[in-house]
Amino acid sequence: MHRDWFIDGANVFVEIYADRIEVVSPGGLPRGLSLTDLGSRSMRRNALIADLLHHIDFIEKAGTGIRRIRNEARAQGCPEPKFEANGFFTATFRPNPEVRASADVRSVHGTTTKVTMEVTMDDAKVVRLLQAISGTMTRHDLQSSLGLKNDDYFRKAYLLPALRAGLIEMTIPDKPRSKYQCYRLTAEGQDSVHVRLMPNTTMEDTVEDTMEVAMDDAKVVRLLQAISGTMTRHDLQSSLGLKNDDYFRKAYLLPALRAGLIEMTIPDKPRSKYQRYRLIPKGREV
């Protein structure tokens, strides 16, 4: 209804990217209308089409589309949509940052991306957040427990980095702005909650050391307790509630193998798709 039908060879496109959706329509704004007018003034480019769509109750013909788009974006916690007009009219929509962070964490499952430790903010802040969480907590309670008053600073410096790293999760991920929304530690977060900054070391060094430990008894015991008969790596990882492949391998699987507590069923082909793991007598005694 809004496109310019006199531009030959052009179509309306909906382009989906990792971080945004762009709707591109042939033709700029109708003559006499500017970008600053959007949401307050309306002008029909194709009056006959608009009348037909209104007649079949497909549109309301009240010029409230832009206003409703902006209101809905705010209601969902999404950034303000961006509109551009330069021969084509482009509307750009970006997702709610908390939903995006949660989706990034879920997409890690089945890959070897080291999301858990690749945080891009001050690691010490995330450690403080992890240590503050007890059970499930609201955003307000978390912020208060850290003694922080600035909502935006807490969200950007503490909450979003922890979500992106897969260390915490929302209890209602499909409704990020729900008044009942709470946050809790993930399995990775529970394992990382004891990380401390040591004198003369950076947080990056400490985290790397934690990941490279030769044997963390608590993690290995959890792994041994999860094994039933012969199990694939995927089944073992799922039974422990872990999503990050690389973290599971370094913190659980390799230490148990090095300690001689579990073994591969096909030791000569460690990367075989039929590979399984099982307890050996020493592992059953732990």
Image (cartoon, grey):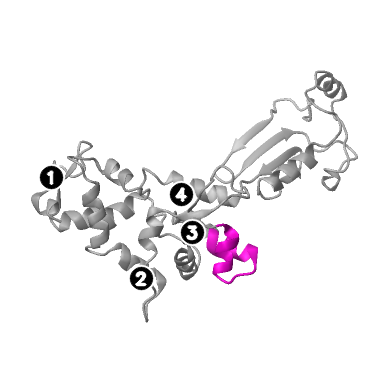
Q: Nearer the viewer, mark 1 or mark 4?
A: 4
- Which is nearer the N-term, disc 4 or disc 3? 4
Q: Earlier in the sequence, mark 2 or mark 4?
A: 4
In terms of sequence position, does the residue under pointer 3 or pointer 1 come before the other? 3
Closest to the observer, 116 or 14: 116
Q: Quadrant of the C terminus?
A: bottom left
Identify the residue under disc 1: 267
Identify the amino acid type marked 1: Pro
Query: Which residue sits at x=65%, y=49%?
Result: 77
In this picture, which residue range is highlighted in magenta?
A: 138-159
Q: Which residue is mark 2?
A: 206
Mark 3 Cα within 10 Å, few/some/many (few <14, many 20+)?
Answer: many
Left or right of residue 188, residue 179 in this image: right
Which mark, by number, is residue 105? 4
Determine which residue is flagged by label 3: 162
Q: Position of residue 194 (x, y in %)?
A: 37, 67
Comparing 271 with 261, the one in front is 261
Which amino acid does the dot numbered 2 rest on? Thr
Question: Where does residue 87 sit, x and y in percent of width and height?
Answer: 76, 38
**Badge 1 vs badge 4, beta-carbon distance below 8 Å:** no
- In the displayed structure, 4 sits above or below 166; it is above
Measure the C-alpha gap from mark 3 to mark 1: 37 Å
Q: Secondary structure at mark 3?
A: helix
